[in-house]
Image (cartoon, rainbow, N blue to C red):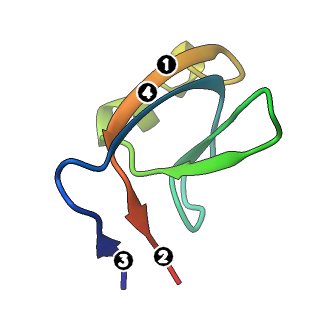
Amino acid sequence: MALEAQVSERIKVAGVMTIVPGGRTPGSIGLDDGRCFDLALPEAVCEQRWRWQSKREVVSGPLKSCP
């Protein structure tokens, strides 16, 4: 179960998107420094994944921790 961080703990990152429908998480973003964040994506993004797949994007939102 994910633990939601404090509302003030929002992040904004830039990197290359990977969208994998049906995976553990619908997508991830890989940063230039090697870090990677799993993403909870809206269904509309997954349905039109060709628009974001393997493209450089900026995403922001609350940070959640999954054990």
C-alpha span from label 1 to label 3 = 23 Å
Report the residue marked by disc 1. Answer: 58
Going from the N terminus, do you reach mark 3 or mark 2 first? 3
Report the residue marked by disc 2. Answer: 66
C-alpha span from label 1 to label 4 = 4 Å
Q: Are marks 1 and 3 in contact (CB under 8 Å)?
A: no
Would residue 4 appear left or right of 55 to someone viewing this image? left
C-alpha span from label 3 to label 2 = 5 Å
Report the residue marked by disc 3. Answer: 2
Q: Secondary structure at mark 2?
A: loop
Looking at the picture, which amino acid does disc 2 mark?
A: Cys
Q: Residue at x 66, y 15 (%)?
A: 55
Report the residue marked by disc 4. Answer: 59
x, y percent for residue 40: 39, 51
Looking at the picture, which amino acid does disc 4 mark?
A: Val
Going from the N terminus, do you reach mark 1 or mark 2 first? 1
Q: Are marks 3 and 2 in contact (CB under 8 Å)?
A: yes
Q: Secondary structure at mark 1?
A: strand
Mark 4 packing: few (<14 Cα in 10 Å), some, or many (20+)? Answer: few
C-alpha span from label 2 to label 4 = 19 Å
Count of numbered marks: 4
> In the rendered image of this protein, does residue 45 appear above or below residue 34?
above
Mark 1 packing: few (<14 Cα in 10 Å), some, or many (20+)? Answer: few
Looking at the picture, which amino acid does disc 3 mark?
A: Ala
